[in-house]
Amino acid sequence: MNNDLPSSFPIQQFIQIFGSENVLTDPAERWSYGYDNSKKHALPDLVVFATEHEQVFQLVQLCNTHNIPIVARGRGTGTTGATVPIKQGVVLSLERMNKIINIDPENRVATVQPGVTNQKLQVAIAKHGFFWPPDPTSAAFCTVGGNLAYNSAGPRAVKYGTPRENILGLQAITGEGKEIITGTYTTKGVVGYDLTRLIVGSEGTLAIITEATLKLTPLPESKRVLRAIYNNMHNAAKAVSAIMAQPFTPCALEFIDGTAIDMVRDFSNADLPSNAGAMLMIEIDGPATTLSEGANKIEVAATNAGLLSFIEPNTQEEIDELWATRKALSPALRNVAPKKINEDVVVPVSKIPELIDKLEELSQKYQITIVNFGHAGNGNIHVNLLVDPDDPLQAENADKCLDEVFSTVIQLNGTISGEHGVGLAKRDYVDREITPASLNYMHNIKKLFDPNNILNADKMLPAPEVS
């Protein structure tokens, strides 16, 4: 037993709830549960692993009694520091709470525990002819609970929506220690306030999800993938607006800019022309009989003066190479800049060209390489600042550049986060986007759900103004 815990820490009561095999006390074991993909870190006092709802209920009751902070955690794939235990206390890992409770094909519903990985869910429901639309890049590792906590969506959101549009109900424990069931088992229902979608995206600050009832979508009969290459990002952005203004909605519309293309060449076997300034990857799905017409409509919309090529890969190998190019971006960028700053801002699709122009201007102004890629179909741009934060001048310039990026996004009627969440990384920028009155309501909601402020304290919302 480790002896660096606070003397008042009721360690035996935690062991009674979870069993000694599900409680980590050694600092070396606790260390790896103190960070997420933001690389921020804080050592928790204790790590516990839940496997059932009742354990979570007892944990929250115990922590309220002793005023011990709790941070609920999935697999730590978040990028904003939302699961970093800055108040120490207990990290509640939900990764072992990973059962698929029920699949109900007749009603297009699946009920799961929060620790089920996105990929495990997709494999299980595909056997019944369905999929769950949210598909983050980290789907093989991230959990459904994490997807819900961040409202993380991925490429398919352009057609099928985010987790908020693909969930029916929840079972959860509030910060006060109350058991709640929200939502319905049906796709229609307007009884009471919509607590389900309030909790989704709240980053574990209001309640801990212990069970989720998900809305499933039938697998499409057929898919086709298209690739368009442009001389510059501005013309690619104009094509995105045109594609999204015609009635055949793609199920994915991804882009990478010229700088990203140059960086990814060594990580991809796809044929990428040397003069490529931007690339769109377009996936369409639906009945096979409609896809040829859909592809034609998209090609017409995608054609402008900057279009260099528009092709449809002929083989599955070529399709896989195309998507591998997109997925190779993160490892490629990490090799170039291991401590890159990655922000996922969103602007209206028609405003993408203006945002791209401003990002190019900021890159020149601050002498910082900016690489852009993301989900162009809904204006969700991943803005990557390649800087060395150990260099004081670069770090200072990065902060100033990022400040202007967020200001520009808000001026364009956008939002500073599309799917990565807020956590610690963007918390202090939130009041630029949300009015004081709205923030006040949010702080009051937090107090109502979590009166002792034990759930993921000091995350997501800036500190309330002192009256």
Image (cartoon, rainbow, N blue to C red):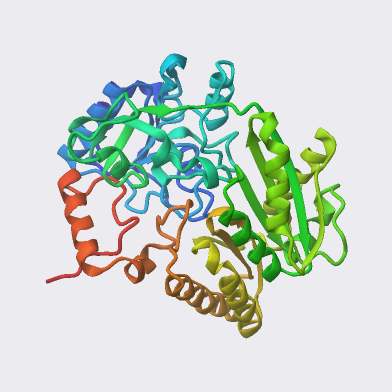
How far from the left and from the top, in percent, is residue 27?
45, 41
How far from the left and from the top, in percent, is residue 236?
69, 64
How far from the left and from the top, in percent, is residue 195?
25, 40
365 vs 380: above or below: below
Tell whether 327 sits left or right of 25: right
Say which quadrant the C terminus sits in.
bottom left
Location of residue 436 (image quadrant):
bottom left
Which residue is located at x 71 percent, y 44 percent? 295
Which residue is located at x 60 percent, y 74 percent? 359
Question: Looking at the image, can residue 70 be seen?
Answer: no
Say which quadrant the N terminus sits in.
top left
How far from the left and from the top, in percent, is residue 158?
54, 47
Number of on-image labels: 0
Tell whether 224 sits left or right of 129: right
Q: Nearer the viewer, residue 388 or 142?
A: 142
3 vs 288: above or below: below
Which residue is located at x 41 percent, y 39 percent? 165
Which residue is located at x 53 percent, y 43 percent? 159
84 vs 440: above or below: above
Tell whether 12 sits left or right of 311: left
Question: Looking at the image, can residue 215 be seen?
Answer: yes
Location of residue 315 (image quadrant):
top right
Location of residue 293 (image quadrant):
top right
Q: Nearer the viewer, residue 49 or 333?
A: 333
398 vs 349: above or below: below
Residue at the farthest bottom position: 365
